[in-house]
Image (tube, helix red, strand yellow):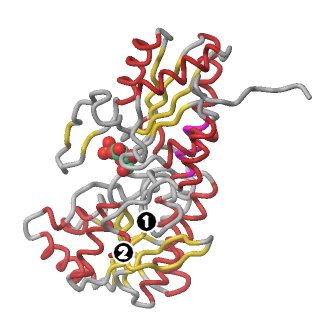
Amino acid sequence: MRIGIITGGGDCPGLNAVIRGAVRAAEVTYDSTVIGFRSAWRGVMDNDYELLDVDRCRGILPLGGTILGTSRDQPFAREHGIELVRRAYDRHGLDAIIGIGGEGSMGVVNALHQKGFPVIGVPKTIDNDIPLTEMTFGFQTAVQICTDAIDRLHTTAESHHRVLVVEVMGRHVGHIAIWSGLAGGAALILVPEEPFDLDEVCERIVNRHRKGRWATIVVVAEGALPKPGTFEVPEPEVDVYGHKVLGGIGHLIAREIHGRTGIESRTTVLGHIQRGGSPVAFDRILGTRFGVAAVDAAAEQAWGQMVALQQGQIVRVPVEEAVGSLKSVQPDLLRLNTMFQPRLPSDSHPGLVEP
Ligand code: F6P
């Protein structure tokens, strides 16, 4: 076999583990060749590539980012893009292309599959929002980075008796916010799944401080939004790919909390730190499993399938079923979020009662 491979969309830790896994499986199990196209579909269309073998992949397992580079360029957005992809298949004698990417990239994989191209999908998103897979690599690394940051912010928040708002990634869903907020013991976690009421947030904070707590950590997903009509958030800018450039809600919230409660408030935006650096062990293993499974799928000509993690096992699902919707935070985690937030003065628990 001759297999092309691309990494598309935002990078995340574990991409190199997928590439390495795919190359190892191709070379050792199938005596096959892997052609790595640079900067995602741009490299396929512009014939920018390198041959990948086991030697080239030495040392890349703990490396963040992607040795192939990435972009959001894609054939359906470029004139004659599909023709250029077809030419790449012919020129390199490709049996398949493995597309590693998020929501947008899986859409491209699906659309190419519908047009008859032999393609396999590997789900990738730091936000962990692709449906039909319980987890994507990179997510656990981001959660650990955010949890470490929250742990550090606790001590400075307490020293200054402040509210510290921590803004984390999560465009449409709050997986990173919920996981890191719960792990870091944040008092409040605001996620896109549940629009928030800032008055209520402030009431809970004031009540918590009245009861002698010195500080409050609020974790907010960048895509979290207030309940309609309660607080104005300006429309974000849009980049050249039509992607909303999020980031900034944390500053707005901290300013409002400060103004409404009188408690000094600051913001930390973790931004791309969440996507940088070395993957944690879980992400290295998941990436490796996905890479190997993608090559197995190509060997079995399981075109249009996406590899996925379900109940701890690597499975295949039709990529068309994984596009068009997003995976939200599980209800039991949302319940924990409600349970651990500061009480309102009207909440009824009497407190400890001597026997
Ligand atoms: O979709 C993944 C993601 O990391 C989002 O959480 C974030 O909003 C976005 O990408 C950032 O994109 P960029 O790297 O283009 O600024």
Q: How many marks?
A: 2
In the rendered image, the residue lying farthest to the right is 355
Mark 1 Cβ and ligand 1 under 8 Å apart: no
The disc labelled 2 sits on which kind of residue? Glu
Front one among 335 and 112? 335
Name the residue located 23 percent from the left edge and 75 percent from the top edge: 111
Front one among 34 and 84? 84
Lower sequence index among marks 2 and 1: 1
Q: Which quadrant is the C terminus positioned in?
A: top right
Query: At which x and y percent is residue 318?
Result: 39, 79
Q: Which residue is mark 1?
A: 131
Residue 17 is left or right of residue 127, and the answer is right
Question: What segment carries the magenta color?
Answer: 140-148
Query: Compared with residue 324, is residue 238 higher up or lower down, i.e. above or below?
Result: above
The disc labelled 1 sits on which kind of residue? Pro
Front one among 285 and 22? 285
Q: Which residue is mark 2?
A: 321
Query: Compared with residue 254, is residue 285 higher up or lower down, i.e. above or below?
Result: below
| Secondary element at image label 2 | helix
User: Is the Cβ of the residue at disc 2 closer than 8 Å to that at disc 1?
Assistant: yes
Quadrant hosting residue 331: bottom right
Disc 2 packing (10 Å; few <14; some 14–19; many ≥20):
few
Quadrant hosting residue 349: top right
Name the residue located 64 percent from the left edge and 34 percent from the top edge: 185
Query: At which x and y percent is residue 336?
Result: 61, 45
